[in-house]
């Protein structure tokens, strides 16, 4: 009986040692823009992006492709049906690690961090590096990032008829407020 109690106590202590704080959002914002001067704005925003951050710096996020909203409904339809094949590839996923990250080091003043990870989009996974500004206010961690991708890297075909109206690089902006779970 004493051995069983000892094992149970050791199991509880080891679980507490491995426990990590998690920060979470279901309302992160992801915006992309690939506008070209003199043509219509090509910009969309998704305000229902899910993200999870562990205190060890591991981070993952997921965005549904059909969650992106454009100013022009026809652009949204073309985006989902002709470019992103959203029925076949419904999600964009990212998983990675924030270099040198510690929740204990965060303050209300944003600091620059590099996030290394894998972005999966349109069925293709690529390693990317993202520069981010990260700060903590109360129990919330704020992550703001900007980076660029190219449609070709993810096998996204742009028809020649509209190729001149869409920028070669797509600028992506991320804004997350993650709350302690």
Image (tube, rainbow, N blue to C red):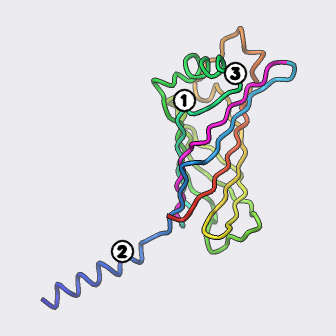
Relative height, residue 149 to residue 21 (above, below):
above
Q: List the single residue furthest toward the right.
A: 38
Q: Nearer the viewer, mark 2 or mark 3?
A: 3
| CB contact under 8 Å: marks 2 and 3 | no
Q: Residues within 10 Å of mark 1 (few under 14, many from 20)?
A: some
- 113 or 110, which lies in front? 110
What span is colored magenta in the figure?
A: 39-54
| CB contact under 8 Å: marks 1 and 2 | no
Task: Give the Cα distance between marks 3 and 1.
Answer: 14 Å
The mark found on residue 72 in the picture is: 3
Which tag, 1 or 2, sits closer to the chain's start? Answer: 2
**Residue 106 coordinates in the image, percent (x, y):** 68, 70
Which tag, 3 or 1, sits closer to the chain's start? Answer: 1
| Residue shown at the point (65%, 20%) measured from the top left | 73
Q: Residues within 10 Å of mark 2 (few under 14, many from 20)?
A: few
Task: Give the Cα distance between marks 2 and 3.
Answer: 51 Å
**SS class of the residue under badge 2?**
helix
**Circle 2 sits on which residue?**
15
| Residue shown at the point (62%, 29%) measured from the top left | 153
Relative height, residue 80 to residue 21 (above, below):
above
Q: Nearer the viewer, mark 3 or mark 1?
A: 3
**SS class of the residue under badge 1?**
helix
**Residue 4 coordinates in the image, percent (x, y):** 17, 84
**Circle 1 sits on which residue?**
66
**SS class of the residue under badge 3?**
loop
Q: Residues within 10 Å of mark 3 (few under 14, many from 20)?
A: few
Q: Which quadrant of the structure image shows residue 41?
A: top right
Residue 143 in the figure: left or right of residue 85: right
Task: Give the Cα distance between marks 1 and 2.
Answer: 39 Å
Q: Which quadrant of the structure image shows residue 147?
A: top right
**Residue 133 coordinates in the image, percent (x, y):** 73, 57
Magenta segment: does it hold 137? no
């Amino acid at each position: 009986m004493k051995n069983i109690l000892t094992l149970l106590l050791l199991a509880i202590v080891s679980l507490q040692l491995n426990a990590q704080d998690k920060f979470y959002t279901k309302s992160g914002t992801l915006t992309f823009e690939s506008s070209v001067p003199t043509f219509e704005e090509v910009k969309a925003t998704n305000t229902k992006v899910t993200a999870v951050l562990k205190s060890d710096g591991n981070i993952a996020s997921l965005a549904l492709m059909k969650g992106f909203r454009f100013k022009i409904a026809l652009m949204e339809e073309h985006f989902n049906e002709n470019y992103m094949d959203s029925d076949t590839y419904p999600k964009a996923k990212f998983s990675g690690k924030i270099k040198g990250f510690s929740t204990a080091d965060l303050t209300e003043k944003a600091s620059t961090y590099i996030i290394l990870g894998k972005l999966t989009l349109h069925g293709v996974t690529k390693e990317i590096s993202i520069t981010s500004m990260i700060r903590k206010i109360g129990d919330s961690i704020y992550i703001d990032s900007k980076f660029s991708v190219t449609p070709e890297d993810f096998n996204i075909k742009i028809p020649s008829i509209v190729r001149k109206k869409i920028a070669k690089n797509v600028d992506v902006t991320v804004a997350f407020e993650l709350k302690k779970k």
